[in-house]
Image (cartoon, grey):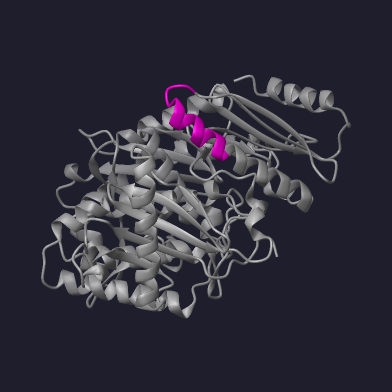
Amino acid sequence: SSAAEIDGAQLCIFDLRRGQQEGQELDKILFFHPADCPILLQLSVIGLCEGIITFTRIFSPEDDCEVIESDKHCHVFYQAEPDIWMVLVVQKIKDNESTLRFGALQGILKESHSLFAMFHGPIRTLLDRQPSAEFARGHLHTFVTDYLSDFSVGKKLQLPTYRDSLTERGTVQMLTVSREVALEVQSLTTVLGSCLRNVICQSIVLFEDLLVSTTLPLDDTLNLYTYAILRLTPSALSSNGNSWSYLRKGGYVNADTTLSSANGAAAAERYNSRSRDTSPGGQNQMHHNFRPLQREKLSKGKDGFVAADFATTEIRGAVPLNPILWFHQAEERMYLCVYQHKNLTILLVIPASSLINGEEGIAHVKRHLLENASQNIVTVEQKLSRGWGGENAYHVGGYRYILSDPNRKVSRASPPGKVITLSKDSLLALNRLRGEIDLEKSRAKRSDPTHDKDYEVCIRAKNNAWIIAKISRGKELYMAIEKGGETLLYASTAVEKFSNRYPN
């Protein structure tokens, strides 16, 4: 298979501020996967994690524990919010300890929390507004379970392995356009921004799975781009649901997953029946058990707008529902309106405070977009399609690479169709090198967080491939060259030639 099947993977979310009294330990558990795991085992796993967190703080009070390796398990930690922890526990089988990279596993935790917060607001806010945590648990169960469905194969989680060593979660992949096309895109974003008379709307424009333009802040762009890649682009909406940017496995939800989702929805419904929703997401999506990652509910309508039939009424049946987002950097609630024309996807973000009538106001914005922006959209799509080189547009002959800028959160990589031509030995060596670099970066950040440390490492793998890592001025380059010379001079020259191709 393309990735190792990991037995015994567990993901838990817990709050260290809860369940501090004897007999109340269950209260600290906010989410646990698998849902059918015995309660005593859940308490044992979270108790061990809490003990590790407390113990490591003795030696490192300023820095969070990130990973603990034991003979049989790997614990990956992420403090998503103050005292709210997410932990992924992976059982080691055979030689898979050499194929797992904690940075990639931690990326799953970071991505799932960022997406949850975008739709439902911070977990701590939900807990403060409803101290019993029933509502927060309900939404975490449905949301995280839907997120994990992309990794589910039967009853197992198929987690990132060495075959994903040339991908980088938490970054945006951008499309390079000519000056002429850039002017057309700028004209389109201006029209999109004026969809409401006295309020400027924000927008993101994507072509295929690549970012063309954005008017949003960096973090909000990344979160919305990630959601679009997972569920909204043409490739995500297609029957296979796979996006070539991420090589996700998707579409299968096992019976335990479905049961967990149903229990979470029921918890949210029970709370809705007796309490007024005041969360950042607003009453709209909360009262309709809004599940933005439920793949089968998303579809493109005849008018070109992508919507989800989440809202159901006795009179009108299924009604398209426009999600409400909570943008951390803007600190504002926003409606999301998605329009698609061929390979062009437009994400229009409208301040919720500017729409008095909610869904009726959204209908007005849609009419304005169709009347005033249709020609701009057609023109941009045609010009982008004409200049698009296909999936291999950013392939560099002889190289298999990923180039990323963590500060700007952008990356560019060899297309998956080229990466799969690498041998297992090359990918294993590259994955192992990336893991060592991850640890070095963590140590360097702890010792001097104000300065980035530069590295350049060239390794000759067992199959005689060159495995190279270079970090310079905050940018990172990882590559594998299988058909090359035998000398270190060859590897160094190859990196220099590649760097000259990307002078920035």
Camera-nearest residue between 181 and 450? 450
> Is residue 266 in sight in this rendering?
yes
- Vertical order, 178 against 341 (above or below): above
The residue drawn where x is 56% and y is 43% is 168
Please state the horizontal and vertical placement of residue 157, each as a whole percent of the image: 54, 66
> Is residue 298 in sight in this rendering?
no
Task: From the image, give the main secondary structure of the stretch colored magenta.
Answer: helix
- Vertical order, 489 against 206 (above or below): above
- Vertical order, 253 against 219 (above or below): below
User: Is residue 167 in the magenta section?
Assistant: no
The residue range painted magenta reads 438-451
Quadrant in which the C terminus appears = top right
Camera-nearest residue between 291 and 110? 110
Residue lying furthest right: 486
Please state the horizontal and vertical placement of residue 1, each as a whole percent of the image: 70, 65
Q: Quadrant of residue 307?
A: bottom left
